Amino acid sequence: MHTISVIIPALNEEKNIKNCIESAKNLNPIEIIVVDGGSSDRTVEVAKNNGAIVIASQKGRGIQMNMGASVSEGDVFLFLHADARLTDIGQMNTESLLNGCIGGFFRLSFDDNSISARLVEFFANMRARLLSLPYGDQALFIRRDVFEDIGGFREYPFLEDIDIALRLRKIGRLRYINHNVVVSSRRIQKGYPLSPILISLRNVMIALLFILGASPCKLIRLYK
C-alpha cells in the first residue's frame, strides 16, 4: 500500500489555507506539509492550527515544492496549490489514485460560475487529458521514485508545472482523476469583460513559447 504526502506551497494564503488543508485530509495522507515562502500574514499560524507540518523556504513554487518533497515520508507526492481544494473525492486511497500510473492530475474547476470561466475550464481539461499536459493547479501527483529519478521540479520563476509534465509524459502515463480540484479564479478574473478567456489565451501563448524553447526568465515578463 502506497502512502501519500500532500505538499502545499504557500505565500500569504491565510484566507485559503484552512480549506485547502481540510480538503487534503480526504486523501488520508500520512502528512500534510505546508511550505511557506515568507508569508507576512497568518498563513503559518492557521496551517499549524489545522494540523499541517509547516516548514520555511525561499519563495518560488518550484523551490517550495522541492523543499516539501525533500522532508516528506510518503511514497506519492501530491502538490496542491494553497488556493485550491479537493472536492467530492470521498475517501480515495493511493492505490485507486495511481491505478498503475506514474502520477496524474484532477479535473480543474474554478470557484466562478461565469460562462467565460467555465469555457476556460472546459478547454483546460481537454488540453490536460488529450495532451497529458496538466497545469500545477490541477493537483499534480507523482510517485516518489519517479519524482526523484527526474530530479524534481526545475526551480524556474514559473512554468515549473508545464516543464515537469513534459518530462513525466516521456516516461509513463499520467492519470486523469474525474474529481474536481476547485481553484480560486483570482488569477483569471480581473474585472474586465472576458478576462478569463483573454488571460487564458495569453497563458497558452506563453506555454507554447516555452515548449518551443523560450526561457522562463524572459517569458515571465509576459505573465505579469
Image: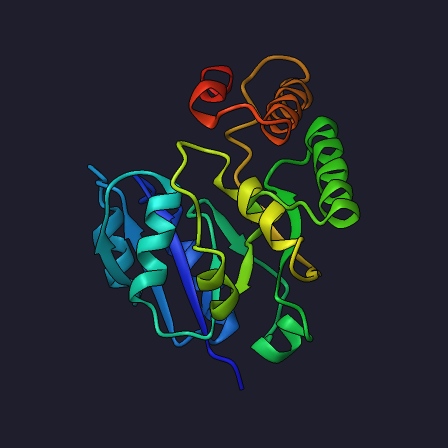
Q: Residue at x 63, y 71 (%)?
A: 97
Residue 112 locus on image (x, y percent): 62, 36
Task: In the displayed orientation, state which residue is furthest to the bottom.
Answer: 1
Q: Is residue 38 left or right of residue 115?
A: left
Q: Residue at x 56, y 17 (%)?
A: 191
Q: Is residue 67 left or right of residue 79?
A: left
Q: Is residue 220 left or right of residue 201?
A: left
Residue 65 locus on image (x, y percent): 38, 52
Q: Quadrant of residue 125?
A: top right
Above or below 136: residue 68: below
Q: Residue at x 51, y 15 (%)?
A: 222
* Total numbered circles: 0
Q: Quadrant of the N terminus?
A: bottom right
Between residue 101 and residue 107, name the one nearer to us: 101
Q: Quadrant of the C terminus?
A: top left
Q: Please say which color scheme the image uses.
A: rainbow
Residue 77 locus on image (x, y percent): 47, 64
Residue 96 locus on image (x, y percent): 66, 76
Q: Residue at x 45, y 18 (%)?
A: 218
